[in-house]
Image (spheres, grey):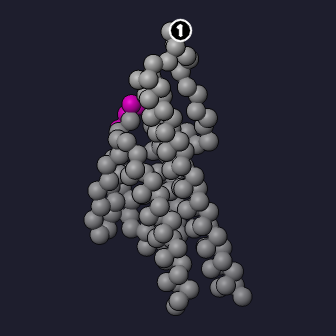
Amino acid sequence: MAADTEKANSQKLYFDRVISAIGDRKGVTINSNDETISILIDSDRGTSEILIGSSSDTYAVQKQHFADLRDVLTSLGIKEGASYTPPPLPKRGMTPMIQKSRAEQRQEFEGWQNVWRRIRAAEKNLDLEFELKQMMDYY
């Protein structure tokens, strides 16, 4: 019983980290109640909303939630593992306003890459716990 509680706490921790990382991004609104979490992502490429159940769902449902998150991010042009490529330098040099704007763009880009890393870490943890449970049931 203690192992199940520990597993649930671990999955909840990873799930909460993903939701927190997404919520920290600009243009993201998160509404939650006891059963679902609604995430509205508004970017320059469009707007998408995703409904996610609680973190106490089954393995298959949790995997589907992460797959849905990945699909939404990809559809909005937020690609996993992309490299930041700044716009070309202006001919007159960079003013402090341009430097600040580029720093903000880079920070937002890195924030979304962090979201991708957290989703992948949560999925990996979910897979490891599922495999461990399967092995324990087998032996």
Q: Main secondary structure of the magenta part?
A: strand
Q: Which residue is at the far front?
A: 96
Residue 48 falls in image quadrant? top left
The magenta span reads 44-48
How far from the left and from the top, in percent, is residue 79? 55, 39
> Residue at left 66%, top 77%?
132
Q: Amino acid at mark 1?
A: Lys
Q: Nearer the viewer, residue 96 or 64?
A: 96
How far from the left and from the top, in percent, is residue 44? 39, 31
> Residue at left 56%, top 17%?
88
Q: Is residue 79 visible?
A: yes
Q: Nearer the viewer, residue 14 or 71?
A: 14
> Residue at left 61%, top 35%?
83
Residue 33 falls in image quadrant? bottom left
Query: Label 1: how many residues lie within 10 Å, few (<14), some (14-19) or many (20+)?
Result: few
Question: Which residue is the site of mark 1?
Answer: 91
How far from the left and from the top, in percent, is residue 17? 47, 61
> Residue at left 31%, top 68%?
35
Q: Which residue is at the far top?
A: 91
Element assignment for label 1 = loop
Q: Is residue 21 above or below residue 110?
A: below
Whether residue 32 sits left or right of residue 113 in the image: it is: left
Q: Which residue is at the far bottom?
A: 1
Looking at the rendered structure, the number of numbered marks drawn on it comes to: 1
Q: Nearer the viewer, residue 96 or 125?
A: 96
